[in-house]
Image (cartoon, grey):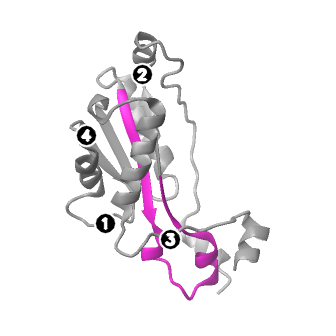
Amino acid sequence: LHDWAMKRAGIAARHIVAPGQGGAAMAASAARAALDDAQVGPDEIDLLVLSTFTGDYCIPSTVSLVQAELGVTAKCFQLEAACAGFIDATIVAAALIDTGKYARALVVHTEVMSSIVDPKRFLEQAVFGDGAAAAVLVSAAWARRHGREGGVAIRAQALATDTPATFESRSMM
């Protein structure tokens, strides 16, 4: 499995959550790292956008669990999105920052693919793992006021991801 995945897709490792761990725990860990890297505290975030399609529960939402774990009091919502979920959440957060209502957004994506892949399907096992990623976006005005470079500069024309039908047609099993 490892050699096949490495040769064909460059995948050197697939991470699987520990028993009892879910997407919210991974998301909170990734979010803390992003906040630390950005030198922004949870109390400074005024928008939290999380994307996933393998949430821990229907209710409460994964974003609510992450919000509580981090102590973020900001507006939060969740996008039900898979492959391009992080990109989608980033685009939405950047657009909301562009309105001027928000200055600092925490964007998080988390998936627990091991909860839904069929262990008997070779390609699924070779490609999918569990993980989370996070980023802090700030408005250009906020960055200037705080003596930091950057700010939101995201422009997207189109996005494309594999659909389930495309994935099924490439299945080796």
Badge 3 is on which residue? 16
Badge 2 is on which residue? 139
Nearest the camera: 77 or 136?
136
* Residue 7 against residue 158 in the figure, above or below: below
Q: Is residue 87 left or right of residue 171?
A: left
Q: Residue furthest right?
A: 7
**Residue at (43% x, 52% y) in the render:** 109
Name the residue type under label 2: Ser
**Residue at (63% x, 83% y) in the render:** 122
Boundaries of the magenta span? 104-132
Do the residues under discs 3 and 1 have CB atoms within 8 angstroms?
no
**Residue at (46% x, 31% y) in the render:** 38
Between discs 3 and 4, the one toward the N terminus: 3
Residue 72 is labelled as: 4
Between discs 3 and 1, the one toward the N terminus: 3
Between discs 4 and 2, the one toward the N terminus: 4
Badge 1 is on which residue? 56
Q: Mark 3 Cα within 10 Å, few/some/many (few <14, many 20+)?
A: some
Instruction: Identify the element where label 4 is drawn.
Output: loop
| Rendered location of residue 94, percent (x, y) | 43, 31
Q: Mark 4 Cα within 10 Å, few/some/many (few <14, many 20+)?
A: many
Image quarter of the N terminus: bottom right
Distance CA(mark 3)–CA(mark 4): 27 Å
Image quarter of the C terminus: bottom right
Name the residue type under label 3: Ile
Between discs 4 and 1, the one toward the N terminus: 1
Instruction: Identify the element where label 2 is drawn.
Output: loop
